[in-house]
Amino acid sequence: TALLLAQTVLEGKATLDDPIARHLPRDLPLTPDTAAITLGQLATHTSGLPRLPTNFRPANPADPYADYDVAKLHAFLRAHRPEKPAPQPAAYSNLGFGLLGHLLERIHGRTYAELLAERLTGPLGLRDTVITLDAGQQARFATPYSGSVAVSPWQLGALTGAGAIRSTAADLARFAQALLGPERGPLTDAWALI
């Protein structure tokens, strides 16, 4: 998600200092402190947003994010009243990165899965790094567990940018090589920005 943001900044479609209000619907009322949170603060976990939205009430605890849609995300933002304005000390926020993914979708007019395929996994040849598994990938997918109990993989709804990506060890190694290798590649400039 941060790499997609970096590419977006390099293309001039946004800046790290853009307030989130710039990329949300104009008729979505936000408090001034919420509206002023920046894309860079979302990417660095300094926005002050909580780890999870306060209106997070899963219909299915076995797949808790699945029903958290854009309407609920916007409802959270409308009701959010920060104790202090950002930036705040770094604190991990699934909500912040999920919101960043949503804002990137709005900036580009594409789904997160499309952005991932077009801008990262496609150019790097990462065929097994996806949001939705095809039949062959599903057959190879490791069963997730909670303790000793097999569970279903989660769907992240509107917070897809927080971690809905599925991959393989081979693709992850290729991704790391693309980021750390000395030769220039499709992510070199974006990685330098991060």
Image (tube, rainbow, N blue to C red):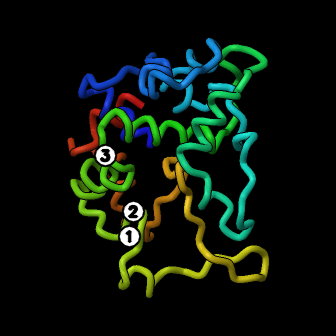
Q: Left or right? Give the position of 33 relative to 182.
A: right
Q: How far is mark 3 from mark 2, CA to CA?
A: 27 Å
Q: Residues within 10 Å of mark 3 (few under 14, many from 20)?
A: some
| Residue with the mark numbered 3 | 110
Q: Amino acid at mark 3?
A: Arg
Q: Which mark is residue 86?
A: none
Q: How far is mark 3 from mark 1, CA to CA?
A: 27 Å
Q: Residue drawn at (35%, 46%), measured in percent from left and top?
A: 179
Is residue 143 placed above or below 182 in the rendered structure? below
| Residue with the mark numbered 2 | 173
Q: What is the quadrant of residue 59 in the picture?
A: bottom right
Q: How far is mark 1 from mark 2, CA to CA?
A: 5 Å
Q: Are marks 1 and 2 in contact (CB under 8 Å)?
A: yes
Q: Residues within 10 Å of mark 2 (few under 14, many from 20)?
A: few
Is residue 148 placed above or below 112 in the rendered structure? below
x%, y% of residue 11?
24, 28
Q: Amino acid at mark 2?
A: Ala
| Depth order, front residue of 189/80 | 80
Q: Quadrant of the C terminus?
A: top left
x%, y% of residue 159?
55, 48
x%, y% of residue 46?
63, 26
Q: Are marks 3 and 2 in contact (CB under 8 Å)?
A: no
Is residue 167 placed above or below 65 in the rendered structure? below
Q: Secondary structure at mark 1?
A: helix
Q: Residue drawn at (72%, 48%), measured in percent from left and top?
A: 56
Nearer-N-terminus badge (3/2): 3
Q: Amino acid at mark 1?
A: Ala
